[in-house]
Image (cartoon, rainbow, N blue to C red):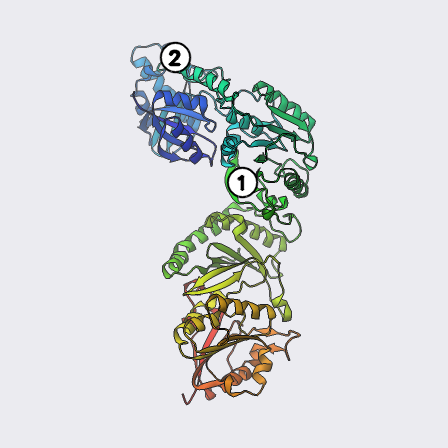
Amino acid sequence: MSKHVFFVTCPKGVEYLLADEMETFGLHLVRNAPAGVWVEGSLESGYRACLWSRLANRVILNVADVDARHADELYDGVVSLDWQVHIPAGGSFRVTFLGQNETIRNTQFGAQKVKDGIVDSIRGAGAPRPSVAPKDPDVTVSARLNRGRLSLGIDLSGHSLHMRGYRTDKGVAPLKENLAAALLIRAGWPEFVATGGDFVDPMCGSGTLLIEAALMALDIAPGRKQERFGFEKWPGHQPDLWLGLRQEAERRAHEGKQKRVPRFFGSDQDERVIATAWKNIQRAGLEDIVQVEARPVHSFRRQEGLSDVGLVLTNPPYGERLSDRKELAVLYQALGESVIRELPGWRLGVFTGAPEFGKSLGLRSFKQYKLFNGKLPAQLLLFEVLAENAMTPRDPAAPGEIMPRIANPERAAMLRNRLKKNLKTIGQWARKQGIGCYRLYDADMPEYALAIDIYEGQVHVQEYAAPKSVDERAARERLAEALSVIPEVLELEPGMLVCKQRQRQAGSRQYEKQAATGDYFNVHEHGCLLRVNLKDYLDTGLFLDHRPVRHWIQQNARGKRFLNLFCYTGAASVHAAVGGASRSLSLDMSKTYVAWAKENLALNGADSGRHRVEQADCLAWLADRKTVDQRFDLIFMDPPTFSNSARMSGVLDIQRDHGALIRQCMARLSSEGLLIFSNNFRKFRLDESLESEFEVQEVSGSTLDKDFQRNPKIHRCWHIRHQNS
């Protein structure tokens, strides 16, 4: 049995599913292509793809590839082929042409050159001139130009295979049949069929998902009702082979109805659309199997006899079909409430061009697939309808919420390219260093004033507050673009990204919760285990820019008494304990951060008796008279720039007060000890008189890793010792 090469086309984003499907027909993958696959197999397998493919648009039998760097070379390549074996004597043909290059820029011109070559080839062999028939030809020749090569083939399908023949009346925004089939496969419908599940679409429109689900479950060939295919007048056609495949399809359709038939139920609020759906169901021969009724989604009710497991799959409006996008949040919330109430234990799939409204469903998605509905980018969101996956519905159109949207593709492309470049440089460096938490981007481009930090697979985005000179609407537009580009470049699920706005915090506001998720997780840094929370606070619990400082402390802490002032979550204390510090004391006035620091130390097995954390006002503690047990060999002090918290004995202004703070620290430092003093005030100037009292060495440059070298002013750091040491 001779082998042939076929190019099988499909909707964009469905290529990998199509390759798997072709394997089931005996067609083996040669290579992937955009919106299609190249496969190899027998003519029978090609016929089977035409009859049985639920995903393909066209099945093209490859005839030859010819050079086509310019028009004359294209013509010469076409005319050199024997077209009598593909076009019937005295018959008709048409040419479909796709692609362009530097010299062939017009598809009509390219098609004309191919037609000329075919006609001249046949006439040159002494045969009658074939006619060109734009409509209903005997054979369709496919010509696809890619750079300097032209692929020529016979379109065996003759029409787009997504047209099954049952849908002549369409809804307002129809979903193509092969895309519907792809959604069903991605959502796991074949597995539900095998385990006795049922199918529901509560916003069914013209019924495409219902019909495709039923055809799939009943093993009915999608091309069963097609009257004609493109190969039937092709000279190479094998009628007996084709007849056998048609008979097999009829037998399988009969046997499919003898097995357990799932329940199929659909509803829609529009009675006219339901009437259209019913006509489509009848034309598909499924009127005894698929039920539909007019009912708004908020009043959806579970039908009697439905299985305990099944699939809800639907394609809600994207916003274009509604006069006001604000209605979408209400609609999606109603969908989520109905499914949670009526179909617990089922799976919900939502195919949408407005995936941000998935937040309104009240469920956490476990999987998202990027696809296209025509040219419109869309996503299939999957949810398990279980109590543990419930969440508070959110309206992404509400004030303060930013919906990912690209308003300026060229500007967004610049950000996309910068992030890809940084991934290759900073990302590669971090992997080689074994660093899982790092800054990927820090306002590299003025249009996108963001800090993007990676936390072992999750992403924390901070938007720097725009100056008053920048229009607020423009700033939100750019942030929306960034939130669209970042998950794409980093290949992230949307739930793995957290976005906040960074503003100056004063007093107790720096400790206020931004949310209350309790969503903590552990990260690693130089052998230390640290808890972070990307959602609940302005900061995450780990200042990434101080990573080298903490590492230095870890390498130099053995046997030393360590003091951590303004300790935050105690990360530096963890490094000191892991590095072998004999004891440590960590102080902070925040009850939240004191508890967090204790948990961090406990995570690393630190002895709570030797490594203590206490809630204290560091200003008052330093001003108090020191005792013998309050002398230390290594002190780390990284105060806030400004604080007027009610818990403090006074107001802290780091520029004004740092001299006194340093002198008080030095009074508690052993004779050969070291104070590491750091702060992030951009305009900070060290009190010059300190250099006459102590050995002062600025080490800021050595405390910045590669991911912060673009922004060297993020902090400044000094090593301070007694002069007699």
Residue 99 image-quadrant placement: top left
Residue 655, disc: none
Q: Give the residue at mark 1.
A: 379
Residue 239: give x, y in percent of width and height.
39, 12
Residue that appears at 46% across and 88% down: 692
| Extreme residue toward the bottom, this view | 724
**Residue for point 60% across, 82% down:** 620
For label 1, the crowd category at 10 Å Cα-Cα, with few meaning under 14, some 14 to 19 and many 20 or more, is: many
At label 2, which amino acid type do we have?
Pro
Element class at badge 1: strand
Give amino acid for label 1: Gln
Q: Is residue 105 above or below residue 470?
A: above
- Counting from the top left corner in percent of width and height, residue 198 is at 57, 31
Please name whichever residue, 23 or 307, is drawn nearer the observer in this view of the structure.
307
Q: Which mark is residue 239?
A: 2
* Label located before the other in sequence (2 or 1): 2
Task: Determine if residue 273 is in view.
Answer: no
Q: Position of residue 579 (x, y in %)?
A: 41, 72
